[in-house]
Amino acid sequence: VDDFYAARDITTTPLPWPSIAPPITDVERALERHGQRDKKEALAAAKKAVAAYGFSLEDITSVRSPVKSTRKPKKKPAIPSVAKYSNPTDKSQTWTGKGRQPDWFKSALAAGKTPDEMAI
């Protein structure tokens, strides 16, 4: 216990940054050299494997798979649907028979009309 308190009272002087920086850059350089060496070894292994089948690495890498386009395909212009039914009371109101039934169509059906009677 006494040693702990004694060690706590010891103050150290901080190291200046220039004395720490060179070892860090040396480590970074060493890591970069190691990575380059790994790439060279992998490239040599790939060339050897491809050569075993009678190809060169250039032959294999020049064949590319088709790239999918990120562009959307052009849509054809919408062709308006032809009206199939008209309102018996107001002929300007029409319906193609697609989508929701208009209120006038529903009310005509409720009144006893058939879709064939409202057909254009």
Image: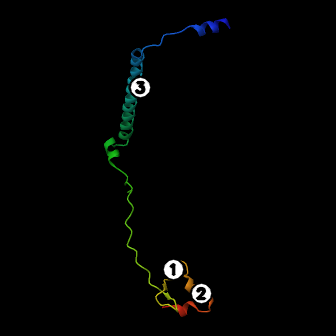
> On residue 45, which mark appears?
none
Quadrant into which the N terminus falls: top right
Q: Name the residue under label 2.
A: 107
Q: Position of residue 76 (x, y in %)?
A: 38, 71
Sooner in the amino-acid sequence: mark 2 or mark 3: 3
- 3 and 104: which is toward the camera: 104
Q: Mark 3 points at which residue?
A: 31
Q: Is residue 56 visible?
A: no
Q: In this view, does 24 lie above or below 51?
A: above
At label 2, which amino acid type do we have? Ser
Is 94 left, or right, of 70 in this rendering?
right
Q: In this view, does 91 lie above or below 13?
A: below
Sooner in the amino-acid sequence: mark 2 or mark 1: 1
Q: Position of residue 54 (x, y in %)?
A: 34, 43
Q: Are marks 2 and 1 in contact (CB under 8 Å)?
A: no
At label 3, which amino acid type do we have? Leu
Q: Where is residue 91 in the image (x, y as percent from the top left)?
A: 47, 90
At label 1, which amino acid type do we have? Lys
> Callout 2: 10 Å neighbours few (<14), some, many (20+)?
few
Q: Quadrant of residue 43?
A: top left
Taking the spot 37% from the left edge, 43% from the top edge, the residue there is 53
Sooner in the amino-acid sequence: mark 1 or mark 3: 3
Front: mark 2 or 1: 2
Front: mark 2 or 3: 2
Q: Can residue 7 be seen in this view?
A: yes
Disc 1 to disc 3, C-alpha distance:
68 Å
Q: Name the residue under label 1.
A: 98
Q: In this view, does 83 lie above or below 13?
A: below
Q: Of all residues shown, which one is farthest toward the bottom?
A: 117
SS under mark 3 = helix
